[in-house]
Structures are given as C-alpha cells and as structure tokens.
Image (cartoon, helix red, strand yellow):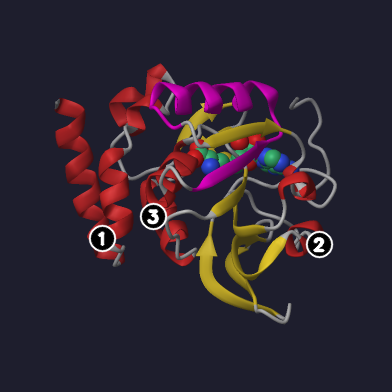
Amino acid sequence: MEYERERKKLVNSLREYNISEKTLNAMKKVPRHLFVPSVQIANAYVDHPLPIGYAQTISAPHMVAMMCDLLDLQEGLTILEIGAGSGYNAAVMAEIIGSKGKIYSIERLEKLAVFAQDNLKKAGYSNVEVICADGSLGLPEHAPYDRICVTASAPCTPLPLIEQLKPGGIMAIPEGKAYQRLYLIKKDMEGNIIKEDRGGVIFVPLVGDHGFNMLCGDR
Ligand code: SAM
C-alpha cells in the first residue's frame, strides 16, 4: 500500500516530461521496488538511476518513460532490448505491449541476467525472455524486431541491430562515450534509415563486439 502511494506520486511527477498516459499507466502498474537490490528499496520510487551491482544501474524512471514514448510502443509488438540490467525497463514495455507481445532482453553479465529474469518472474511478467549474451550482435534467431531498445551507450550504431530491425521498425539507442546523445532510428518500408537526435543522455557503456572494448575484470 505504501509502495503504491509512492509509485503514484512518482509517476504523476513524470508529467513534467510530457509522458503519454499510456506509458504513465504502465508505470503505475510496475512494482519498481521488486527490481532494485534490497539495500535500495527505500529509494525505489525516487526519480534517479540506482546501482544494481557490477558497476551497472537501473535507469531513472523519467528516462524509461521517455524511451517507451519515443519507441511508440503498441500492443502485440516484438521487441529486442539490449541491457536487461534489473528487468524494470522490460517490465514497463511488457505492460504496454500486453500478453500478445514478446520481449527478448539481452544482458551480457550473467549475474544480472539471472537478477533480471528473477525480478520479472516475481513481478509476473511471463512474456519477457532474458538471454545472457553480447547484445551488440543482436539476436538473429528471433529477428526481425518491431522495436529495438538499447539501454547502454554504443560507440556508433551496431550494424547487426540495423539489419535486425523490421521495415517500419524503430530503434532507440544512446551513442557516445563522455558526450552521449540519444538517437531514434527509423527504418522505412524500403529499408532506408532515418536517424534523429533526441538530446543528451547518460548511460553506462555498451560493451562487446560492436560496442566499446571489453572492460577488464568485470565478468
Ligand atoms: N534496462 C535496465 C533496467 O531496466 O534496469 C538498465 C540497463 S543498464 C543502464 C545497462 C545494461 O547494459 C547493464 O546491465 C550492462 O551490463 C548491459 N550491457 C552492456 N553492454 C552490453 C551488451 N553488449 N550486451 C548486453 N548487455 C549489455
């Protein structure tokens, strides 16, 4: 009950970012306190990124909301997420796309992949599958995807992700190292790519074959 009150307050505060009612309603349903480590539960409904261990973070709620809106999520879509982290972003997207949709969420750190899948199970999201792999390569076996949501910052747009996006599909991806921008990439029905700059952001690095080089000792 206490969590529900805090969640409502947080979600209402996101209106200042002009978030759609569809996304706000989804966020009202997702119990963020089930997606943070126990030491962070008191901060679960603060609009901040929080540490989830292994030098990684769960993104701030306003960033999750903005990415969902940019991706123009609809019921029944198939989504590829890169960077499962806590599983929270996937849960919000799962609320919007409903039980007819499907999310494949890739996480490169095994312990976080397990953390994300456990959290999603606890919260009751059965249409999200977490896979431990290098998401900079995408997930060709289930391609093409209606939407691709990248939650770690890439040096440039990974080619496999562009290839695995459906014609008419949309990808949101942060790019850059110290200076990062969020890009919205649209593939039209002829396969042409349109890339729009949606402003400055701060994400952890995308590490992998089409990401930044492997960080020493972080596996
Ligand atoms: N979406 C997450 C959530 O809701 O908690 C937050 C993700 S966190 C900002 C970024 C995640 O991307 C980290 O967990 C990191 O380990 C992961 N990551 C970085 N490079 C990756 C790659 N090549 N493939 C898959 N995951 C990657």
Residue 78: percent from the left, percent from the top? Answer: 57, 52
User: Could you tell me which quadrant the C terminus lies in?
Assistant: top right
- What amino acid type should be assigned to the residue bearing mark 2? Leu
User: Going 61% across and 31% down the picture, which residue do you hit?
Assistant: 55
Q: Is residue 144 above or below residue 53?
A: below
Q: Which mark is residue 159?
A: 2
Q: How busy is the neighbourhood of tag 2: few (under 14 within 10 Å), some, or many (20 plus)?
A: few
- What amino acid type should be assigned to the residue bearing mark 1? Glu
Contact? badges 1 and 2 (CB < 8 Å): no
> Is residue 108 found inside the magenta-colored segment of the image?
yes
Horizontal side, residue 110 vs residue 124: left or right: right
Which range is magenta? 101-125
Residue 67: percent from the left, percent from the top? Answer: 47, 58
Q: Which mark is residue 65?
A: 3
Q: Is residue 201 above or below residue 141?
A: below
Q: Is mark 1 within 8 Å of ligand 1?
A: no
Residue 96: percent from the left, percent from the top? Answer: 39, 51
Instruction: Find numbered disc 1 in the image and state the secondary structure of the residue it sits on.
Output: helix
| Badge 1 or badge 2: first in the primary sequence | 1
In this rendering, which labeled residue sits more in front, label 3 or label 1?
A: 1
